[in-house]
Image (cartoon, rainbow, N blue to C red):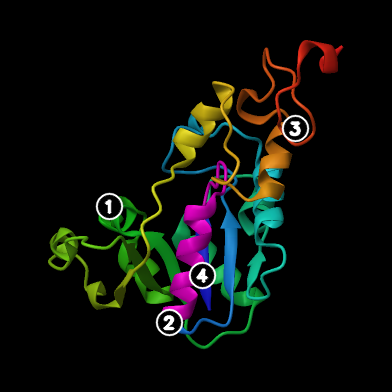
Amino acid sequence: MGIFGGTFDPIHHGHLVIAEQVADVLGLECVIFVPGGVPPHKDFASVKAPVEDRYAMVEAAVKGNGRFVVDRVEVDAGRAMYSVETVPLVKERYEGEEWFFVSGADEVSNLLSWRDPDGFLAEARMVAATRPGYDISNLDHLAAELKNFDRIVPVECTRVDISATTIRQMVADGKSVRYLVPEAVHEIIHDRGLYGAGDGVAVDARGESLSEEDAS
């Protein structure tokens, strides 16, 4: 069983490729997406979309994939939650013998800044999703500090150069993000006016710019 946590602000195809390929490589029965409510490691002001909108986008993105599900454990908590708290709660809700927490390798390299990293690794093995050519020695500094370092599992995934930050900026600039995010996510962004979608630009329900005549 896999747990994939994040702010997903918004979720995009890069996230989905990682989840799908990690599930294939490790033979995971299910990947549970856990959108973060109040992220403890980020300035909350840096999270742009309301938590219910981010949850809705993740739910829409994974619809139709039988081994992807979304859980509200952090959304409903109403407070900052650390991964070492989240993982046991998720494990109580689902049956699984072996658990993996999915994250990008760059985030894994910062694991020492997480709350109780060894306790976290005792709860679940950590997947370090790497891009092709990634220098795995970037994680070597963790070995001297973590007794559970051997529970970190590198998995090489197809590189998809998409970031949520770039997507948010493109939307704010009135640029199309179609094909960077699932179509259902694209529609939610524009229907709900997330990230400044539609500010100063008339758009239809699919996010397409309208002419002055059509907008009148």
What residue is drawn where x is 58% and y is 32%? Answer: 176
**The C terminus, quarter of image:** top right
Q: Is residue 118 left or right of residue 182?
A: left
Q: Does the segment drawn in magenta span residue 40?
A: no
Within 10 Å of disc 3 (Cα), the crowding (few <14, some 14-19, many 20+) is some
Q: Amino acid at mark 2?
A: Leu
Q: Earlier in the sequence, mark 4 or mark 2?
A: 4
Residue interval drawn in magenta: 6-26
Q: CA distance from mark 1 to mark 3?
A: 34 Å
Q: Amino acid at mark 4?
A: Glu
Q: CA distance from mark 4 to mark 1?
A: 24 Å
Q: Nearer the viewer, residue 72 or 198?
A: 198
Within 10 Å of disc 4 (Cα), the crowding (few <14, some 14-19, many 20+) is some
Q: Earlier in the sequence, mark 3 or mark 2?
A: 2
Name the residue tied to disc 2.
26
Name the residue tied to disc 1.
110
Q: Nearer the viewer, residue 206 or 123?
A: 206
Q: Secondary structure at mark 4?
A: helix
Q: Amino acid at mark 1?
A: Asn
Q: Earlier in the sequence, mark 4 or mark 1?
A: 4
> In which image quadrant can residue 158 be found?
bottom left
What residue is drawn where x is 52% and y is 88%? Answer: 97
**x, y (%) of residue 47?**
53, 34
Q: Earlier in the sequence, mark 3 or mark 4?
A: 4
Q: Nearer the viewer, residue 151 or 147?
A: 151
Name the residue tied to disc 3.
192
Residue furthest out toward the right: 216
Q: Earlier in the sequence, mark 1 or mark 2?
A: 2
**x, y (%) of residue 4?**
51, 63
Within 10 Å of disc 2 (Cα), the crowding (few <14, some 14-19, many 20+) is some
